[in-house]
Image (cartoon, helix red, strand yellow):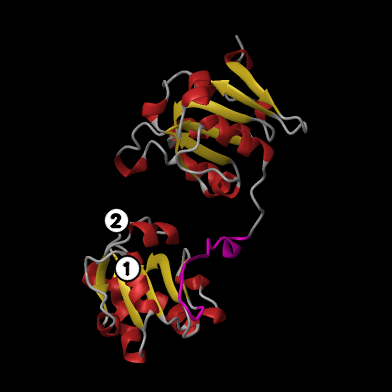
Amino acid sequence: MSNFDRQTELHTSATGRGRIMAMDSAYDVDERNRERDVCVNSSYCGVSPVRFIGEHLPRGAIGMDCAVGPEGSAIAGLWYLEALGVTAAVADVMSAHLGDGVHLYENGVISFFNQLAADCGVETGMPVREAARLLLEHDPAEASASEVTNRTIMETSADGRHVIATDSIAFGTDEDVDTNVLVTAGHTGRSAVEYLRRCRPLGFICSDGGRGLDDSGMAGLFIVEDEGMAGATIDARHARMGSGLSHYHDGVISAVNAHAAACGVEIGMTAARAGSLLLGR
Protein backbone atom coordinates (compact mmCIF):
# COMPACT_ATOMS: atom_id res chain seq x y z
CA MET A 1 0.00 0.00 0.00
CA SER A 2 1.44 3.41 -0.96
CA ASN A 3 1.48 6.44 1.27
CA PHE A 4 -1.14 8.00 -1.00
CA ASP A 5 -3.53 5.12 -0.26
CA ARG A 6 -3.43 6.14 3.41
CA GLN A 7 -4.78 9.62 2.61
CA THR A 8 -8.44 10.61 2.43
CA GLU A 9 -9.49 13.53 0.25
CA LEU A 10 -11.92 15.76 2.16
CA HIS A 11 -12.18 18.89 0.02
CA THR A 12 -10.92 20.11 -3.34
CA SER A 13 -10.41 23.81 -3.98
CA ALA A 14 -12.78 25.21 -6.59
CA THR A 15 -9.89 27.31 -7.88
CA GLY A 16 -7.62 24.32 -8.41
CA ARG A 17 -5.19 25.36 -5.66
CA GLY A 18 -5.15 21.88 -4.11
CA ARG A 19 -6.98 19.68 -1.65
CA ILE A 20 -7.49 19.06 2.03
CA MET A 21 -6.18 15.56 2.71
CA ALA A 22 -6.70 13.67 5.96
CA MET A 23 -4.16 11.13 7.13
CA ASP A 24 -3.69 9.27 10.37
CA SER A 25 0.04 9.98 10.61
CA ALA A 26 2.49 12.68 9.58
CA TYR A 27 4.55 9.93 8.01
CA ASP A 28 1.83 9.50 5.37
CA VAL A 29 2.51 12.91 3.79
CA ASP A 30 3.45 12.24 0.18
CA GLU A 31 5.38 13.96 -2.60
CA ARG A 32 2.06 14.43 -4.40
CA ASN A 33 1.04 16.87 -1.66
CA ARG A 34 3.94 19.22 -2.50
CA GLU A 35 2.99 22.90 -2.64
CA ARG A 36 -0.72 22.16 -3.17
CA ASP A 37 -2.41 20.24 -0.35
CA VAL A 38 -3.27 20.92 3.28
CA CYS A 39 -2.36 17.76 5.21
CA VAL A 40 -4.56 17.19 8.25
CA ASN A 41 -2.54 14.56 10.09
CA SER A 42 -3.39 13.16 13.51
CA SER A 43 0.20 13.09 14.78
CA TYR A 44 1.91 15.28 17.33
CA CYS A 45 3.72 18.27 15.80
CA GLY A 46 7.20 17.73 17.19
CA VAL A 47 10.41 17.99 15.21
CA SER A 48 10.63 14.27 14.43
CA PRO A 49 7.34 13.86 12.49
CA VAL A 50 7.66 17.34 11.00
CA ARG A 51 10.93 16.38 9.34
CA PHE A 52 8.86 14.04 7.15
CA ILE A 53 6.30 16.73 6.41
CA GLY A 54 9.07 19.19 5.61
CA GLU A 55 10.60 16.85 3.04
CA HIS A 56 7.47 17.21 0.91
CA LEU A 57 6.60 20.89 1.60
CA PRO A 58 2.79 20.75 1.38
CA ARG A 59 0.78 23.97 1.23
CA GLY A 60 -0.17 23.54 4.89
CA ALA A 61 -0.28 21.08 7.78
CA ILE A 62 -2.51 20.62 10.81
CA GLY A 63 -1.58 18.19 13.59
CA MET A 64 -2.24 17.69 17.31
CA ASP A 65 -0.75 19.50 20.32
CA CYS A 66 -0.47 16.37 22.53
CA ALA A 67 -0.60 18.54 25.67
CA VAL A 68 2.37 20.60 24.35
CA GLY A 69 4.86 18.82 26.64
CA PRO A 70 8.07 19.93 28.31
CA GLU A 71 9.85 22.68 26.38
CA GLY A 72 6.95 22.75 23.92
CA SER A 73 8.28 19.56 22.38
CA ALA A 74 4.92 18.40 20.97
CA ILE A 75 4.38 21.61 18.98
CA ALA A 76 7.97 22.65 18.19
CA GLY A 77 7.43 21.61 14.59
CA LEU A 78 5.14 24.61 14.04
CA TRP A 79 8.19 26.87 13.86
CA TYR A 80 10.30 24.30 12.04
CA LEU A 81 7.65 24.43 9.31
CA GLU A 82 7.43 28.21 9.48
CA ALA A 83 11.14 28.40 8.69
CA LEU A 84 10.44 26.23 5.63
CA GLY A 85 7.56 28.46 4.53
CA VAL A 86 4.79 25.97 5.42
CA THR A 87 1.63 27.23 7.14
CA ALA A 88 0.87 25.04 10.16
CA ALA A 89 -1.41 24.67 13.14
CA VAL A 90 -2.31 22.13 15.81
CA ALA A 91 -5.53 21.11 17.51
CA ASP A 92 -6.19 20.54 21.20
CA VAL A 93 -5.56 16.83 21.75
CA MET A 94 -8.75 16.59 23.81
CA SER A 95 -10.89 17.76 20.90
CA ALA A 96 -10.24 14.85 18.48
CA HIS A 97 -8.95 11.29 18.26
CA LEU A 98 -5.23 10.76 17.94
CA GLY A 99 -4.41 8.58 14.95
CA ASP A 100 -7.60 9.47 13.05
CA GLY A 101 -7.12 12.27 10.53
CA VAL A 102 -10.76 12.39 9.44
CA HIS A 103 -11.92 12.71 13.05
CA LEU A 104 -9.39 15.51 13.56
CA TYR A 105 -10.77 17.36 10.53
CA GLU A 106 -14.37 16.94 11.62
CA ASN A 107 -14.00 17.59 15.37
CA GLY A 108 -10.66 19.26 16.12
CA VAL A 109 -10.32 22.73 17.62
CA ILE A 110 -7.22 24.82 16.95
CA SER A 111 -4.95 25.53 19.93
CA PHE A 112 -1.67 26.82 18.44
CA PHE A 113 -0.40 27.96 15.03
CA ASN A 114 2.61 29.56 13.39
CA GLN A 115 2.88 33.10 12.04
CA LEU A 116 2.16 32.01 8.47
CA ALA A 117 -1.12 30.43 9.56
CA ALA A 118 -1.99 33.56 11.52
CA ASP A 119 -1.44 35.56 8.33
CA CYS A 120 -4.06 33.34 6.67
CA GLY A 121 -6.60 34.13 9.42
CA VAL A 122 -6.26 31.08 11.67
CA GLU A 123 -7.24 31.74 15.30
CA THR A 124 -7.27 29.87 18.59
CA GLY A 125 -10.60 28.06 19.12
CA MET A 126 -11.35 27.79 15.38
CA PRO A 127 -12.63 24.45 14.09
CA VAL A 128 -9.97 22.50 12.21
CA ARG A 129 -12.21 22.22 9.14
CA GLU A 130 -12.40 26.03 8.96
CA ALA A 131 -8.67 26.49 9.55
CA ALA A 132 -7.84 23.91 6.88
CA ARG A 133 -9.90 25.80 4.29
CA LEU A 134 -8.18 29.06 5.20
CA LEU A 135 -4.78 27.42 4.69
CA LEU A 136 -5.95 26.03 1.37
CA GLU A 137 -7.42 29.21 -0.05
CA HIS A 138 -5.02 31.85 1.30
CA ASP A 139 -1.32 32.51 1.03
CA PRO A 140 0.57 34.29 3.81
CA ALA A 141 1.98 37.62 2.75
CA GLU A 142 5.55 37.49 1.54
CA ALA A 143 7.59 39.69 3.82
CA SER A 144 11.16 40.15 4.94
CA ALA A 145 12.04 39.54 8.59
CA SER A 146 12.02 43.30 9.24
CA GLU A 147 8.45 43.57 7.92
CA VAL A 148 6.97 40.95 10.27
CA THR A 149 6.48 43.24 13.24
CA ASN A 150 2.88 42.44 14.33
CA ARG A 151 2.60 46.11 15.27
CA THR A 152 -0.87 46.44 16.82
CA ILE A 153 -2.62 49.36 18.52
CA MET A 154 -3.97 48.14 21.89
CA GLU A 155 -5.23 51.38 23.44
CA THR A 156 -5.72 54.96 22.29
CA SER A 157 -5.85 58.06 24.49
CA ALA A 158 -8.28 60.92 24.03
CA ASP A 159 -5.54 62.99 22.36
CA GLY A 160 -4.62 60.25 19.87
CA ARG A 161 -1.58 58.64 21.49
CA HIS A 162 -1.36 54.83 21.59
CA VAL A 163 -0.24 51.79 23.50
CA ILE A 164 1.27 49.66 20.73
CA ALA A 165 2.29 46.00 20.93
CA THR A 166 5.08 44.92 18.60
CA ASP A 167 7.49 42.01 18.61
CA SER A 168 10.74 43.93 19.20
CA ILE A 169 11.85 47.34 20.36
CA ALA A 170 13.79 47.38 17.08
CA PHE A 171 10.41 47.95 15.40
CA GLY A 172 9.86 51.31 17.09
CA THR A 173 9.45 54.18 14.59
CA ASP A 174 9.64 57.96 14.41
CA GLU A 175 5.88 57.98 15.06
CA ASP A 176 6.56 56.79 18.59
CA VAL A 177 8.90 59.59 19.70
CA ASP A 178 7.50 61.11 22.92
CA THR A 179 4.06 59.91 21.79
CA ASN A 180 3.37 56.19 22.11
CA VAL A 181 3.93 53.48 24.70
CA LEU A 182 5.56 50.37 23.23
CA VAL A 183 4.96 46.89 24.62
CA THR A 184 7.59 44.68 23.01
CA ALA A 185 8.91 41.16 23.34
CA GLY A 186 12.69 41.20 23.32
CA HIS A 187 14.97 41.47 26.36
CA THR A 188 15.96 44.81 27.88
CA GLY A 189 19.69 44.21 27.97
CA ARG A 190 22.20 46.84 26.93
CA SER A 191 21.78 46.00 23.22
CA ALA A 192 18.18 47.28 23.46
CA VAL A 193 19.35 50.74 24.48
CA GLU A 194 20.26 51.98 20.98
CA TYR A 195 16.77 51.07 19.76
CA LEU A 196 15.14 52.82 22.72
CA ARG A 197 17.20 55.93 22.03
CA ARG A 198 16.28 55.80 18.36
CA CYS A 199 12.49 55.81 18.87
CA ARG A 200 12.34 57.43 22.35
CA PRO A 201 8.80 56.26 23.17
CA LEU A 202 6.66 57.96 25.79
CA GLY A 203 7.05 54.73 27.74
CA PHE A 204 8.14 51.15 27.11
CA ILE A 205 7.57 47.66 28.46
CA CYS A 206 9.93 44.91 27.30
CA SER A 207 10.87 41.42 28.51
CA ASP A 208 13.36 40.84 31.30
CA GLY A 209 14.69 37.91 29.25
CA GLY A 210 14.65 35.70 32.33
CA ARG A 211 16.75 38.38 34.06
CA GLY A 212 20.11 36.78 33.20
CA LEU A 213 23.41 36.89 35.05
CA ASP A 214 23.71 40.08 37.11
CA ASP A 215 20.23 41.11 35.88
CA SER A 216 21.76 41.77 32.46
CA GLY A 217 18.40 41.10 30.79
CA MET A 218 16.99 44.32 32.24
CA ALA A 219 20.12 46.52 32.36
CA GLY A 220 18.77 48.86 29.67
CA LEU A 221 15.84 49.78 31.90
CA PHE A 222 18.16 51.75 34.16
CA ILE A 223 20.61 52.97 31.51
CA VAL A 224 17.84 54.99 29.83
CA GLU A 225 16.40 56.09 33.16
CA ASP A 226 19.09 58.78 33.24
CA GLU A 227 17.75 60.02 29.91
CA GLY A 228 14.21 60.47 31.23
CA MET A 229 12.63 57.37 29.69
CA ALA A 230 9.94 55.55 31.65
CA GLY A 231 10.09 51.79 31.36
CA ALA A 232 9.30 48.43 32.88
CA THR A 233 10.01 44.78 32.17
CA ILE A 234 7.82 41.70 31.87
CA ASP A 235 8.62 38.43 33.65
CA ALA A 236 9.77 36.12 30.83
CA ARG A 237 8.11 33.18 32.58
CA HIS A 238 4.64 34.57 31.87
CA ALA A 239 4.76 35.84 28.28
CA ARG A 240 6.19 34.49 25.04
CA MET A 241 9.37 36.22 23.99
CA GLY A 242 9.05 37.35 20.40
CA SER A 243 5.31 38.05 20.71
CA GLY A 244 4.34 41.59 21.60
CA LEU A 245 0.69 40.58 21.81
CA SER A 246 1.51 37.87 24.36
CA HIS A 247 3.45 40.43 26.39
CA TYR A 248 0.47 42.78 26.37
CA HIS A 249 -2.15 40.14 27.20
CA ASP A 250 -0.14 37.79 29.45
CA GLY A 251 2.61 40.01 30.81
CA VAL A 252 3.29 40.60 34.49
CA ILE A 253 5.62 43.44 35.49
CA SER A 254 8.91 42.25 37.01
CA ALA A 255 10.88 45.51 37.32
CA VAL A 256 10.33 49.26 36.88
CA ASN A 257 12.58 52.27 36.65
CA ALA A 258 12.00 55.45 38.63
CA HIS A 259 10.05 57.26 35.91
CA ALA A 260 7.63 54.35 35.44
CA ALA A 261 7.23 54.02 39.21
CA ALA A 262 6.30 57.72 39.34
CA CYS A 263 3.44 56.89 36.94
CA GLY A 264 2.15 54.25 39.35
CA VAL A 265 3.58 51.18 37.60
CA GLU A 266 4.33 48.43 40.12
CA ILE A 267 5.89 44.97 40.15
CA GLY A 268 3.17 42.33 39.81
CA MET A 269 0.88 44.58 37.75
CA THR A 270 -0.42 43.42 34.37
CA ALA A 271 1.26 44.81 31.29
CA ALA A 272 -2.06 46.14 30.02
CA ARG A 273 -2.59 48.19 33.20
CA ALA A 274 1.02 49.38 33.19
CA GLY A 275 0.69 50.48 29.57
CA SER A 276 -2.36 52.57 30.43
CA LEU A 277 -0.51 54.27 33.27
CA LEU A 278 2.48 55.09 31.07
CA LEU A 279 0.15 56.46 28.39
CA GLY A 280 -1.07 58.99 30.96
CA ARG A 281 2.40 60.47 31.61
Evaluate whether residue 26 shows in this view: no
Depth check: give the residue in front, 119 or 52.
119
Going by the image, does 271 lie left or right of 215?
A: right
- Label 1: how many Cα within 10 Å (few below 14, some 14–19, many 20+): some
State the separation of the CA atoms marked 1 and 2.
15 Å
Question: What is the secondary structure assignment of the residue under circle 1?
Answer: helix
Depth check: give the residue in front, 92 or 159.
159
Q: Residue at x 62, y 38 (%)?
A: 134
**Magenta extent:** 144-160
Residue mark closest to the camera, 1 vs 2: 1
Q: Residue tagged by mark 2?
A: 238
Q: Give percent across and percent down for residue 102.
A: 53, 19
- Label 2: how many Cα within 10 Å (few below 14, some 14–19, many 20+): some
> Of label 1 and label 2, which has the lower sequence position?
2
Q: Residue tagged by mark 1?
A: 273
Residue closest to the far top: 1
Q: Give percent across and percent down for residue 74.
A: 38, 36
Q: Residue at x 56, y 29 (%)?
A: 129
Going by the image, does 265 lie left or right of 175?
A: left
Question: What is the secondary structure assignment of the residue under circle 2?
Answer: loop
Identity of the amino acid at label 2?
Answer: His
Identity of the amino acid at label 1?
Answer: Arg
Q: Give percent across and percent down for residue 197.
A: 45, 84
